[in-house]
Image (spheres, coloured by chain):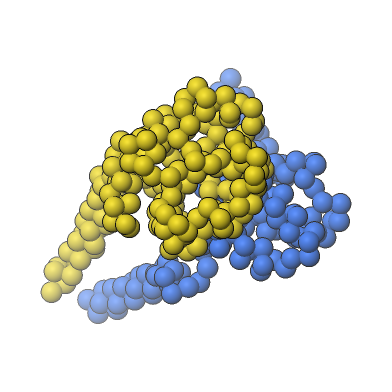
Chain colours: A yellow, B blue
Amino acid sequence: MKKKLLIIPSILFLLIVLTFFYLLIIERNPSEIPSTLLDQNVPKFETESLLKKERFISSKEFGNEIILVNFFATWCLPCRDEHTYIKRFSNEKGIRVIGINYKDNPKKAIQWLKNLGNPYSNVPIDKYGRIAIDWGVYGIPETFIISSKGIIKYRHVGAVTKKIYKKINLLIEEIE
Amino acid sequence: MIKKTFIILLSICLIQFFSNNSYTVEPNEILKNQKQELRARNISKNIRCMVCQNQSIDESNAPLAKDLRILIRNKIKDGKKDEEIYKFLTDRYGDFILLKPPFKLNTLALWLLPFIFVLIGIFIVFSHNKKSKKI
């Protein structure tokens, strides 16, 4: 009886090892934190637009169709990497993409979009990063899917890769 | 020679250990009202830097940490209460932004398991002692 009980700690230990091993091998990004804003309304904001004269008013822009919101800046290298996929969303899939220009130099941003192509239907300027805080952004680039009712459905932190591109397309189909 | 290097290394460690007064709050961020500044510092110490994740925004150099420090100070100047500031931050970044997880239903295991394990340990030690005394 006593000897049998002695096995219990080793089994527990084995279970702990297995859990750790499982967490190691599954594909996940431990620094990615789920957004608390999921299934909530888009934060309201009003700001200047990089390419248009009229001010950007969020309540006028969201709530009609599915929209992707992409936080980007010219100083952010991963933003350059994901730009081809952002362009594919708007050019190939016909999805409206709003690019929030995060703490950037407007002149550089305009040139950047000229050089790399502009996938954005509108580019609101977040000069001081205050809008990003309302969206719970902590590391640009970040990409959000907004439903046609103006509700945040998904958030991806980091550059959009081929895999994420496919994932976002699937999610958009599901939401539609 | 070895003794000398050992003493030097030890003193460096000791200096590092006792000199944790340095902080990253920049001079232009500091509020003139000392009471308000103290409140801001206390809040910042409890707020996680989302970029570096194991530092508070009070000790982090990340730009987002700086933005949040300034935001907290502005809110204090506007007369916001501490609870309101914490709520503002958790509404946007979730409970993860608090360095100390709150006592909630989904964190119950986190808070209570250590005590349960200690109790189990005590139980095992006592029952083991009893048995060995009998022999």
| Depth order, front residue of B25/A57 | A57
Q: Residue at x 64, y 30 (%)?
A: A105
Q: Is residue A157 above or below residue B135?
A: above
The quadrant in which the N terminus of chain A is found is: bottom left
Q: Residue at x 65, y 46 (%)?
A: A55
Residue A113 appears in view: yes
Looking at the picture, how far across and down is residue A143, in whole percent? 44, 45
Left/right placement of residue A9 relative to residue B17 reads: left
Residue A129 appears in view: no
Left/right placement of residue B26 relative to residue B84 reads: right
Q: Outermost residue toward the front?
A: A53
The quadrant in which the C terminus of chain A is found is: bottom left
Looking at the picture, how far across and down is residue A6, in whole percent? 19, 66
Quadrant in the picture for residue B122:
bottom left
| Depth order, front residue of A103/B64 | A103
Q: Outermost residue toward the right?
A: B32
Looking at the picture, how far across and down is residue A8, in whole percent? 20, 66
Q: Is residue A126 above or below residue B73?
A: above
Quadrant in the picture for residue A73:
top right
Q: Residue at x 59, y 35 (%)?
A: A51
**Count of all numbered marks drawn on residues in the image:** 0
Q: Residue at x 62, y 34 (%)?
A: A104
Looking at the picture, how far across and down is residue B99, in whole percent? 55, 57
Left/right placement of residue B132 relative to residue B98 reads: left
Q: Is residue B120 above or below residue A143?
A: below
